Amino acid sequence: MSGDWRTWLMIGAVGFGGPAGQVAILHRELVERRRWLDEEEFLSALRLCMLLPGPEAQQLATYAGWRRDGLAGGLLAGTLFVLPGAVLVTALAWLHAAGGSWPLVRAAFAGTRPAVVALVALAAWRIGRKSVTSPGAVAILAAAAAALAAGVAFPWVVVAAAICGGLLPSPPAKPAADPAAGSPPPADTATGRPLGHIALVVGLSVVVWAAALWAVVATHAAGGRGAAIARLFTTTTLLSIGGAYAVVPWALDESVARGWLEADERFTALAMGEATPGPLILVVTFIGFMAGWKALPDAALQAGLSGASIATLFAFLPSFAMIFGLAPFVRSIQAGSWVGRAMTGVGAAVVAAILLLAARLAGDAFLAAGTLDPLAIAVAAAAAAALVAGRASTPIVVLAAAVIGVVTSLIGGSGLW
């Protein structure tokens, strides 16, 4: 394990492109280059991680680290996979908070707003075309959108969507693929007493979570907001079935309602999550920093760093627990037909939440001054076109939008405000 940390840190530092890009990087490094996993085991682990709440790429890295070096390897891999992104988001959060009165910094973040609208709209399209493919799923999407617009809490909408999805008709069965010949299961794959192992891991994880929460409360961390940050972002991860976008809109709304973010800071949070390496769920790092920064003005930086650390830790603790609990049985876990249908319902509810978020953000970005902003619309259209055509990566699109905001401010033009 002595040299593995360089590999995991490198993977975390170049992990742009969302879950698909990160999984592709992991496949290239773990299967093709280093041969730490074979193709069959990689795909089995990926299927499990896609069924679990939380960021699947980080969970897949944790599983691979566990296969290499057990518990220590899993902790190393999962931590280093998110560390570069978390550090970068924290630094950008400080720049946003400390530079709020700096005109060029304010202009740069304002410039990213229309690009964020394009990113969120494309996320709805990308997820929707895969998960909303039947009349039943469309009906669940419409009902979920109506419920969310009426103020029903997202967790309840997810539960109802899963139940309704489970009642949908089963899709036609597909012929099973032949198993890979000559590929024996891993030597340490557990075959007996799975419930006992899972119960042990769950119990230990609850103890660790409670001890960490006690330390947060005892130290009055993040200006006294530490415990609330910890509870909210533990819940955020547990609700993120189907990807981070499943729950990011809810987390942002909760943060605005609690006074941790201003409404227009939702743009900044999403821009940072999309433009930095690592899982999108790292938007919670930005939220945690801002919650601490605003809670303790006399020691804003210290409280902000504390809030960012707490948010990141508690957002990823459930992922570690789930992987360590299920990793020994990865080859024997299969998604049953009910699970697949329930996931279809959850996917439809996720698309509804993303569409509502996109509509709210579009209103804020395009009508910021009370009148339609043609420059903001043009930037959003250009960002969407570049992303769809594959001519620019997400970080480049966000950076270009920030530059447009700065240039507009320097020349005294109107728009983007």
Image (cartoon, grey):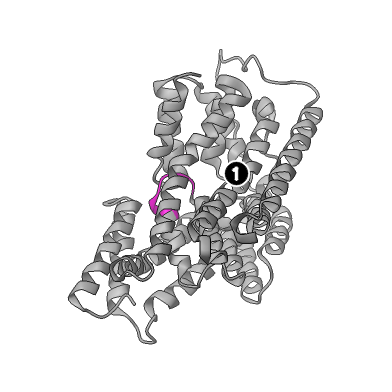
Q: Quadrant of residue 277?
A: top left
Q: Position of residue 213 (x, y in %)?
A: 70, 48
- Sort mark 1 into few (<14), some (14-19) or many (20+) by Cα contacts within 10 Å: many
Query: Would you say 270 lies left or right of 196 here?
Result: left
Considering only vertical position in the picture, is 9 above or below 163?
A: above
**What's drawn in magenta, residue-wise?**
273-279
Where residue 252 sits in the image (x, y, percent)?
55, 64
Give the labeled residue for mark 1. 316
Please tell me which residue lies in front, 347 or 95: 95
Residue 336's x, y, as percent? 70, 40
What residue is drawn where x is 43% and y is 41%? Answer: 84
Quarter of the view holding residue 103: bottom left
Residue placed at 51% from the left, 39% from the top?
Answer: 57
Q: Identify whether 114 is placed above or below 195.
A: below
Count of picture labels: 1
- Is 414 displayed left or right of 3 in the figure? left
Of 333 and 26, nearer the camera is: 26
Furthest-front residue in this view: 298
Front residue of 180 and 401: 401
Nearest the eye: 146 or 102: 102
The kind of secondary structure element at disc 1 is helix
Q: Residue 368 lies in what quarter of the image?
A: bottom left
Does 198 lie within the magenta span?
no
Percent position of residue 210, x then y: 74, 45
Q: Give the residue displayed 72% in from the left and 38% down from the top.
A: 205
